[in-house]
Image (tube, rainbow, N blue to C red):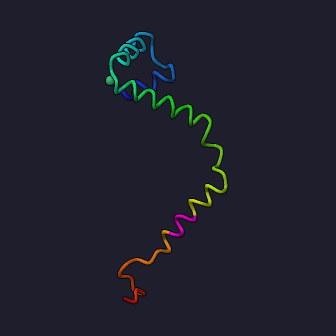
Amino acid sequence: MSELATDYLEGALPWHARLRARLHLFYCHACRHYVDQMRRTVRFLAHGPHKPPPPEVEQGVLDAIAADAGKPVAGSHDDKT
Ligand SMILES: [Zn+2]
């Protein structure tokens, strides 16, 4: 059903398959949930990805990575205990 969901969302299915998909979604919770997520993702992608994150977010992530990398590792050569 998951490949179908993409076609379903893109409207690429022939009417009978579309009908079947719709019917399936009517009684199948898992797929309905999946399609719902897909729809949300598609919408998100349509708006989101070409815009870079705000600089403070990017800097926050970079800081977090740097802080993590700078942490002394237990048992490393300059551990003076
Ligand atoms: Zn299903």
Q: Quarter of the image for the C terminus: give it.
A: bottom left
Query: Does residue 71 lie above or below 41 as drawn?
Result: below
* 11 or 63, nearer to the observer: 63
Q: Quadrant of residue 17?
A: top left
Quarter holding ligand 1 = top left
In the image, what residue occupies the spot 40% across and 86% down? Answer: 79
Q: Quadrant of residue 24?
A: top left
Image label count: 0
Q: Position of residue 55 (x, y in %)?
A: 67, 55
Q: Quarter of the image for the N terminus: give it.
A: top left
Q: In the visual, does 53 lie left or right of 17?
A: right
In the image, what residue occupies the spot 40% across and 10% down? Answer: 16
Q: What's drawn in magenta, residue-wise?
A: 63-67
In the image, what residue occupies the spot 38% across and 82% down? Answer: 76
Q: Position of residue 14 (x, y in %)?
A: 45, 13
Q: Position of residue 64 (x, y in %)?
A: 53, 64
Q: Residue furthest front?
A: 81
Query: Does residue 21 lie above or below 63 as drawn?
Result: above
Is residue 7 magenta-colored? no
Q: Position of residue 47 (x, y in %)?
A: 62, 36
